[in-house]
């Protein structure tokens, strides 16, 4: 089985790199194959909201970029992990573009925010937005997500705890 890890190319920190190493170790120990997307600004176009992917193109987006390639293979992934900074309580726009364009797993979708600079209000907003965004998608497309997890890390100790929780979900 395969997993996909989406990271923010423009916002790497020691903490996010530590999490990435731990997550890679966890997934390989579980015998899972790992694909990665390291996304920077302007590498993935925003969804146009044209709905042609749903009405005419059999699930394929009319935009052709990095997200298109991964979206085509999405059924191969048993889990998708998004490692991102928290920006004013939300995902950075280029990471949100990845999710909006359908690069997620129907089985397990995990979003991990780096909260070292985030206030408690921003953390709460981040959790709420991720859960509600995925929940709203499930109303429109029942069964779209089997499990959605949202975690926030502040330290290497948090990374250990998060990987332990993820390990129990695999």
Image (tube, rainbow, N blue to C red):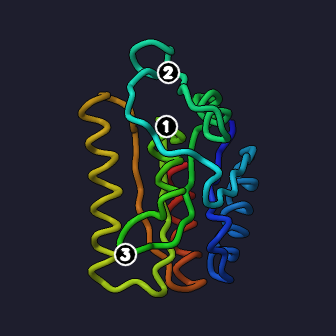
Q: Which mark is residue 28?
A: none
Label 3 with label 1: CB-CB less than 8 Å: no
Q: Residues within 10 Å of mark 2 (few under 14, many from 20)?
A: some
Label 2 with label 1: CB-CB less than 8 Å: yes
Q: Is label 3 or label 1 in front?
A: 3
- Out of 139 and 27, give the one closest to the viewer: 139
Left or right: 70 with respect to 21? left
Across and down, in percent, residue 109 comes to 48, 48
Q: Which residue is mark 1?
A: 102
Q: Is residue 11 above or below residue 76?
A: below
Q: Which residue is mark 3?
A: 88
Label 3 with label 2: CB-CB less than 8 Å: no
Left or right: 10 with respect to 50? right
Q: Which residue is mark 2?
A: 59
Across and down, in percent, residue 133 comes to 31, 49
What element does badge 1 sit on? Answer: loop
């Amino acid at each position: 089985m395969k997993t996909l890890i989406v990271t923010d190319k423009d916002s790497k920190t020691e903490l996010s790199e530590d999490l990435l190493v731990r997550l890679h170790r966890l997934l390989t120990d579980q015998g899972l194959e790992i694909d990665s997307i390291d996304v920077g600004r302007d590498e993935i176009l925003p969804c146009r909201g044209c709905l042609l992917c749903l009405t005419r193109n059999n699930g394929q987006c009319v935009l052709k970029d990095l997200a298109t390639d991964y979206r085509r293979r999405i059924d191969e992934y048993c889990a998708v992990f998004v490692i991102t900074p928290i920006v004013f309580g939300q995902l950075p726009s280029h990471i949100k573009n990845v999710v909006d364009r359908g690069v997620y797993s129907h089985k397990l979708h995990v979003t991990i925010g780096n909260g070292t600079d985030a206030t408690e209000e921003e953390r709460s907003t981040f959790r709420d937005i991720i859960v509600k965004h995925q929940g709203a998608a499930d109303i429109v497309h029942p069964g779209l997500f089997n499990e959605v997890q949202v975690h926030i890390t502040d330290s290497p100790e948090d990374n250990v705890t998060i990987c332990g929780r993820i390990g129990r979900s695999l």
